[in-house]
Amino acid sequence: MTNGVRAVDHEYGEHDPILPAPVDPALDQAPIAQETRLAMYQLQEEIRQVEKELHRLFLEGLVQGTSHLYLGMEATATAFGTALRPDDYTFATYRGHGHTLARGVPMKGVFGEMLGRSSGILGGKGGSMHLTSVEHGMLGSYAIIGAHLTIANGAAWSAKYRGTDQVAVAFFGDGTTNIGAFHEALNFAVVYDLPVIFVCENNLYMEYTAIGDITAVPNPAADRAAAYGLERIIVDGNDADAVYLEASRAIEKARAGGGPSLIESLTYRHGGHSRADPGKYRPQEEIDAWMERDPIATYHQRLLRLGVDEGTLTGISTDVARRVEEAVEHAKASPRPSLEASHTNVYADGGARWRN
């Protein structure tokens, strides 16, 4: 520390490994129905297998541009997607494939969009970074860091104004905590007592830089909660049960008029920032430790301890693989958008008349 400010005394990309916490054995006895747990296991498998297939399709040149995979972070989206109601609202970043699937958007629509086909949920015009499905409460994946937090406030304010008990949830990365919109959104949500939940998916890295290198507090979201009168909440983001319990509590609080929450979910992406990033700036010891705390492997073992047989879990994984294959083939067989489609959905009324 120098004059109260932490000094970074290493070269870029060099730092001590940040290791995950051990699995909490008490979560085996968490009050979560086995049916819910099996549904969360299936959803994590769906997200994992879809992401792996998207990676393969990207390497084949079928996914244009870049893509930001959610591999290794499946537990957080799964838990919130399970805890939310169909009429609630989700806002995600460009790493939004998992959140889109967690809100019930069909695989065929996701693959169609990723491959730029007319069968996509946005007709093939949004692509990897902008997945949106209003009918499923997935109100967008946003490429502008932090911008969607303020929009989530708007959705929450709308629900409060209309007298519903809908809840808005905004997911964002650790780097967003150093963006002005993060602090503005938190302050606004507390002042107006909005039914919104802010979830920082802290995977330890921004684009290529460790969040700890440029942030004055160890936990970039939770350690700032008190500045806005919010509870400091940190959860094991690689354990679906831990996230589900915390998500359920925050959602119930928001529905009951208790106002916003800020949750920091500790997790780790398996790969680099995007498919263009090999992620070599991360210590190997750190990577190995987090791979051992893989959320699906962790959950698999818990279900076995709770009496679910291996055959049931294998059957879930096999069925997911079959549906993924069907969805990919459906997307490949779908036509690309027509030239005329580029003129649709540009403005709310389909044209520019509103400007006149």
Image (cartoon, rainbow, N blue to C red):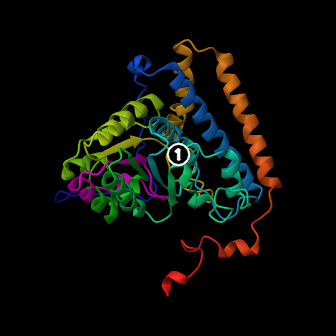
Residue depicted at 51% across the width and 25% down the height: 36
Which of the two residues, 200 or 19, is positioned nearer the viewer here?
Answer: 200
Q: Position of residue 232 (x, y in %)?
A: 25, 41
Q: Residue at x 76, y 70 (%)?
A: 338
Determine the image quadrant of residue 61.
bottom right
Q: Position of residue 236 (x, y in %)?
A: 40, 34
- Circle 1 packing at 10 Å, graded few (<14), some (14-19), many (20+), is many
- Front residue of 108 and 129: 108
Question: In the picture provided, is 271 more to the left or to the right than 325?
Answer: left
Name the residue carrying label 1.
269
Magenta-colored span: 187-215
Q: In which quadrant is the N terminus drawn?
A: bottom left
The verdict on residue 195 being magenta is: yes
Residue farthest along the top direction in this orientation: 307
Is 79 situated left or right of 198 in this image?
right
Whether residue 142 is situated above or below residue 237 in the rendered picture: below
Q: Is residue 215 above or below residue 104?
A: below
